[in-house]
């Protein structure tokens, strides 16, 4: 925001400010606008936004109330900071406030905002969202991607296990975004992200930075704003990213069409294939530029090649929330231990794979995710625009006014939350509060007509990912960071994540009879003592082959009372050869010969033990 100080050098723009103020001045008006801080000409209240916007709004709301009016440049903006006011916006006046302001970045990237996420509320938007929810993101479709989620989580466990064996730190920030994006990429595009990781990562980073940066044209939607964007070369990066995204989207479209424009014979059951099926079903299949632009608008990506409209909430709320969850668990070892104990007790100690069938068995994981959504909503500000005059908490809000709902502040309101700054998942035990838009104290995905369409895809990734990480691994901070603790500094404007990568050292979970066994510890299993344990063997010191009659105990590693060859991955590989030699040798010795002890000399004893075996 420091770049705003340059505005003060444009004194000649006072003329524009005079026209703006004169146009909007109405001394005879009886409307009651929300209170707000005094504003400067031209820049309005932009000078007050020093730092993260939602934190600045929170501080201002302490003085001006839960509904306040700011002027962000030429754009009047109402900031809502209470549960009651949010409910009036998102429920009582949902239809009147369900449009979107125009933002220069998304408008350019999304071909004039003809998408779902940033489009104005109109018949085209309603039809597109209806088709997306009914045909592309229905429960059956989401469930059909279950095998993809489970395979990618297996890959996650494998990669983390490699670091665990070396006791080296894992960059969970990069890992979570890659795994989440890989799931989305396979589900959405039918393509394996592992095959083109470097190029995709570059495209994703550029797109994220472009969408998240400040633009003058957002606060000054006129030639002034575009001039300042041009002056500070903000459009240069935007145009560059637009070309790359357009080329990528065209590549995706071309890969699903034959050279003659026909669809491939057996398309995979992913989202893009469903999109083409949808267009063909509704009779919109043609090669016109407008139709291709509409398809591209649905295909435009955010981190790691995800269909933008359908998975904006999915990728951000998934990866960013996993990062915050692990950060909070490291800061709260009581919660970490309780979660791991519950998971490992319920699922047992012998699981080699976690599936989505296990998710509903562990309730505490769901509580942890809820609490993370409360403290760290990835999208802390919900943005709307009024379509007509509305009243919020008794204040008049005219048409075409931007509304920002500070869900970060609402989720920390001491009126609704006890000890709001503390990470306490137990607060949701026996609580009806959920995150799907009906409870306005907790709105990580929004609510009403503009609720995030990717919620159904995001939640299984979150739950399955956390379940795998807590079941298979114990975690610690890297050497040298233990005294410093976990850095929780935030970063971002639209999507807010950790400013610095989350680096943790994993250790493969090893617990024997309730005792934790550190990594690289030698373990000796006394098979001799086990085979003489009177708990399992009657007269254990006597040689009695008859004890194995009608007995299922064998020596192949499945019965741990008798493990002469070991068991598991390190079982003796020569067992089959050894058994054949022993059986054939003993058969010959007993068939052809009788045996007796040699005559002993006076005073000599026959050794029956193994004293001189070596």
Image (cartoon, rainbow, N blue to C red):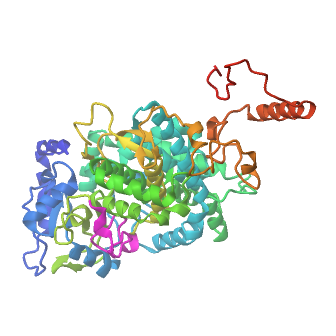
Residue shown at the point (25%, 66%) measured from the top left: 405
The x, y position of residue 585, in whole percent, is: 85, 30
Question: What secondary structure prevails in the magenta region?
Answer: loop
Q: Is residue 501 found left or right of 543 in the rendered image? A: left
Residue shown at the point (93%, 31%) measured from the top left: 592
The x, y position of residue 493, in whole percent, is: 28, 51
Taking depth in this image into account, of 322 and 121 the one nearest to the observer is 322
Outermost top residue:
601
Taking depth in this image into account, of 294 and 602 the one nearest to the observer is 602
Q: How many marks?
A: 0
**Residue 7 visible in the displayed image:** yes
Residue 15, compared with residue 233, is above or below; it is: below
Query: Magenta stretch: residue 188 in it?
Result: no
Residue 529, compared with residue 139, is above or below; it is: above
Q: Is residue 428 found left or right of 152 in the rendered image? A: left
Residue shown at the point (25%, 73%) measured from the top left: 86
The N terminus lies in quadrant: top left
The C terminus lies in quadrant: top right
Residue 401, compared with residue 612, is above or below; it is: below
Give the magenta-colored segment's residue range: 424-450
**Residue 383 visible in the displayed image:** no
Quarter where residue 271 is shown = bottom right
The x, y position of residue 205, in whole percent, is: 41, 41
The x, y position of residue 62, in whole percent, is: 10, 64
Outermost front residue:
602
């Amino acid at each position: 925001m420091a770049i705003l100080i340059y505005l003060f050098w444009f004194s000649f723009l006072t003329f524009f400010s005079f026209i703006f103020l004169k146009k909007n001045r109405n001394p005879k008006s009886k409307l009651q606008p929300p209170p707000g801080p005094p504003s400067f000409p031209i820049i309005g209240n932009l000078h007050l936004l020093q730092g993260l916007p939602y934190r600045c709004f929170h501080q201002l709301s302490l003085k001006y109330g839960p509904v306040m009016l700011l002027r962000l440049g030429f754009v009047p903006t109402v900031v809502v900071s209470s549960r009651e006011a949010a409910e009036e916006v998102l429920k009582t006046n949902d239809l009147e406030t369900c449009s979107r302001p125009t933002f220069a970045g998304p408008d350019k990237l999304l071909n004039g905002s003809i998408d779902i996420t940033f489009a104005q509320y109109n018949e085209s938007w309603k039809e597109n969202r209806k088709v997306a929810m009914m045909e592309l993101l229905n429960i059956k479709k989401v469930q059909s991607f279950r095998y993809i989620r489970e395979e990618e989580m297996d890959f996650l466990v494998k990669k983390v296990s490699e670091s665990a064996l070396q006791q080296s730190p894992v960059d969970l920030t990069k890992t979570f975004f890659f795994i989440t994006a890989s799931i989305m990429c396979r589900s959405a595009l039918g393509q394996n992200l592992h095959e083109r990781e470097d190029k995709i990562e570059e495209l994703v980073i550029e797109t994220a930075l472009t969408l998240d940066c400040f633009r003058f044209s957002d606060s000054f939607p006129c030639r002034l704003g575009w001039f300042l964007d041009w002056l500070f070369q903000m459009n240069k990066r935007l145009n560059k990213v637009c070309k790359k995204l357009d080329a990528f989207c065209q590549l995706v479209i071309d890969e699903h069409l034959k050279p003659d424009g026909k669809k491939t014979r057996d398309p995979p059951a992913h989202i893009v294939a469903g999109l083409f099926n949808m267009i063909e079903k509704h009779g919109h299949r043609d090669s016109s530029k407008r139709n291709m632009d509409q398809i591209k608008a649905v295909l435009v990506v955010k981190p790691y090649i995800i269909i933008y409209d359908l998975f904006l909430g999915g990728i951000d709320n998934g990866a960013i929330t996993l990062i915050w969850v692990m950060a909070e668990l490291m800061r709260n070892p009581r919660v970490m231990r309780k979660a791991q104990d519950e998971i490992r007790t319920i699922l047992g100690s012998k699981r080699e794979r976690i599936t989505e069938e296990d998710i509903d068995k562990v309730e505490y994981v769901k509580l942890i995710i809820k609490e993370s959504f409360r403290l760290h909503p990835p999208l802390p500000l919900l943005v709307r625009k009024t379509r007509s005059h509305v009243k919020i908490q008794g204040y008049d809000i005219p048409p075409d006014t931007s509304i920002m709902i500070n869900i970060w502040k609402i989720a920390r309101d001491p009126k609704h939350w006890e000890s709001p700054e503390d990470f306490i998942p137990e607060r949701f035990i026996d609580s009806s509060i959920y995150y799907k838009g009906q409870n306005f104290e907790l709105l990580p995905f929004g609510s009403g007509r503009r609720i995030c369409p990717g919620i159904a895809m995001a939640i299984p990734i979150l739950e399955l990912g956390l379940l795998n990480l807590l079941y298979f691994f114990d975690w610690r901070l890297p050497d040298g960071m233990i005294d410093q603790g976990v850095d929780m500094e935030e970063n971002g404007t639209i999507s807010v994540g950790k400013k610095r990568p989350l680096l943790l050292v994993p250790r493969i979970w090893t617990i024997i009879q309730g005792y934790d066994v550190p990594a690289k510890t030698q373990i000796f299993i006394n098979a001799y003592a086990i085979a003489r344990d009177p708990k399992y063997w009657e007269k254990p010191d006597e040689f009695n082959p008859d004890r194995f009659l009608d007995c299922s105990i064998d020596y192949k590693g499945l019965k741990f009372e008798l493990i002469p060859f070991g068991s598991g991955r390190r079982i003796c590989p020569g067992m089959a050869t050894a058994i054949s030699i022993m059986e054939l040798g003993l058969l010959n010795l007993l068939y052809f010969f009788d045996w007796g002890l040699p005559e002993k000399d006076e005073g000599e004893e026959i050794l029956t033990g193994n004293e001189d075996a070596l």
